[in-house]
Image: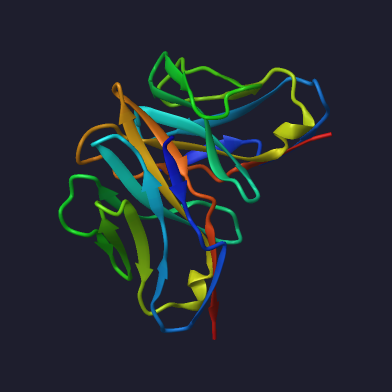
Amino acid sequence: EAQVTQNPRYLITVTGKKLTVTCSQNMNHEYMSWYRQDPGLGLRQIYYSMNVEVTDKGDVPEGYKVSRKEKRNFPLILESPSPNQTSLYFCASSLIGRGVEREQYFGPGTRLTVT
Amino acid sequence: AQKITQTQPGMFVQEKEAVTLDCTYDTSDQSYGLFWYKQPSSGEMIFLIYQGSYDEQNATEGRYSLNFQKARKSANLVISASQLGDSAMYFCAMREVTSGTYKYIFGTGTRLKVLA
């Protein structure tokens, strides 16, 4: 089954404790991206990757890191989480190329609470 | 600045009627894509429909159609024959292609409630 998986789905942590949210896709997609969703703000792009070893900042990259060492994986790293990073996080992937780049496939989301 | 605007925070529609969700966008790019996603209360993001900036015909996917008016920079979603299962949050989004990279911008969403 074609899918984007994220782990963990739910996480409660404390300020300053490093954490990683994993994202994996099995569709051989070049493009992967992380978003955060906050009430009243919609989804905002954190980081994206056009392919392996190619990453770039989205609109809200502060406090986050990413890496793309393999095509299928795109982990989101919070080196020192703070309460303002409490949010719902989505990973997404898509093909790149005219005619095939119609949609992003989203993971199920990770609800993160930082106390 | 590039932006997506959804001016309707919430809407009601009677079951079996049609409803239009508004979306306007702002970009200086010539090449871009417009999307609508549905987010039910369970939280997942469901792709509904896509319109490319160079597409001449309005996109349709079953009961969903996208009313694309390029000159007005609007990309409204029309849902025909609403069903109770259409109650959800709906997001309009734009993909910009700049220097060979893709960036996505989402609107703040419209919460639709279908009434029986």
In the visual, does B27 lie left or right of B84?
left
Q: Position of residue A7 (x, y in %)?
A: 62, 35
> Quadrant of residue B65 in the image?
bottom left
In the visual, does B66 lie left or right of A72?
left
Q: Is residue B99 visible?
A: yes
B29 or B83: nearer the eye?
B29
In the visual, does A9 lie left or right of A52?
right
Q: Is residue A3 visible?
A: no
B64 or B46: nearer the eye?
B64
* Residue B76 higher or lower than A4, as above or below: below
> Quadrant of residue B67 in the image?
bottom left
**Count of marks, rendered view:** 0
Q: Residue at x 54, y 51 (%)?
A: B108
Q: Residue furthest left?
A: B56
Q: Position of residue B53 (x, y in %)?
A: 23, 45
A42 or B49: nearer the eye?
A42
> Quadrant of residue B102 in the image?
top left
Q: Position of residue A112 (x, y in %)?
A: 71, 38
Q: Residue at x 45, y 40 (%)?
A: B105
Q: Residue at x 55, y 61 (%)?
A: B40
Q: Position of residue A21 (x, y in %)?
A: 62, 29
* Residue A80 higher or lower than B72, as above or below: above
